[in-house]
Amino acid sequence: MTTKSASSVVDEAVEDVASETHETSPRERASDMAVGMMSGMRGAAGNLAERLPDAATAARATVDEATRRMEAGSDQALIVGAAMSFGFAAGLFVGGAPRLIVTAALVPAVAMGMTLLDRSGRVTRAAGSRS
């Protein structure tokens, strides 16, 4: 009784499968590839749809916390933070960064500036109502 090595058994199986399969045309291969890509995209979209509510909740909590900290901070800290954010965005712009990245870098500067303007408006209104 002769025994075959594992590699020879695998080689024979590969040859059998190769001889049984027929040649596919480029159109069939492209079609199979497109079907595979679409099923992969469908699965990825399903995963994204499942995770989107959690991501939105986490983003909302982060924005609320950032807003709370900006409102609790001093005017000097807000001025310095807004200036630094604006300077960073200006550096990106001068350096040739894409507009989307420059815009994203301006978001903290705008948020801090709006908080400062809101504070000054409240102080002005409070001073005007005392008179």
Image (cartoon, rainbow, N blue to C red):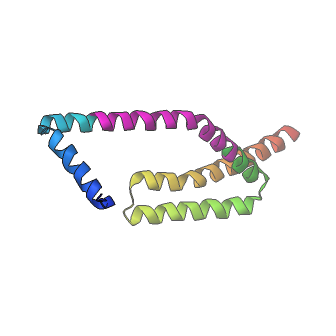
Q: Is residue 131 visible?
A: no
In this rendering, the answer to whether 63 lies above or below 48 is below
Report the front residue among 45 and 4.
Answer: 4
Q: Where, quadrant-wise, is the N terminus in this rendering?
A: bottom left
Is residue 86 shown in magenta?
Answer: no
Q: Position of residue 13 (x, y in %)?
A: 25, 49
Per the rendered image, the range of residues in magenta is: 35-62
In this rendering, the answer to whether 5 lies above or below 59 is below
Count of numbered circles in the view:
0
Q: Residue at x 40, y 65 (%)?
A: 94
Give the quarter of the image for residue 58.
top right
Q: Residue 81 vs residue 93: left or right?
A: right
Report the front residue among 25 and 11.
Answer: 11
Report the front residue among 100 and 127.
Answer: 100
Q: Residue at x 38, y 56 (%)?
A: 98
Q: Where, quadrant-wise, is the C terminus in this rendering?
A: top right
Q: Position of residue 84 (x, y in %)?
A: 59, 65
Q: Position of residue 49 (x, y in %)?
A: 52, 33
In this rendering, the answer to whether 80 lies above or below 122 is below
Q: Residue 120 vs residue 38: left or right?
A: right
Q: Is residue 84 visible?
A: yes
Q: Position of residue 116 (x, y in %)?
A: 69, 51
Q: Residue at x 29, y 33 (%)?
A: 35
Q: Residue at x 29, y 60 (%)?
A: 7
Q: Main secondary structure of the magenta part?
A: helix
Question: Which residue is the extreme one toward the front?
Answer: 1
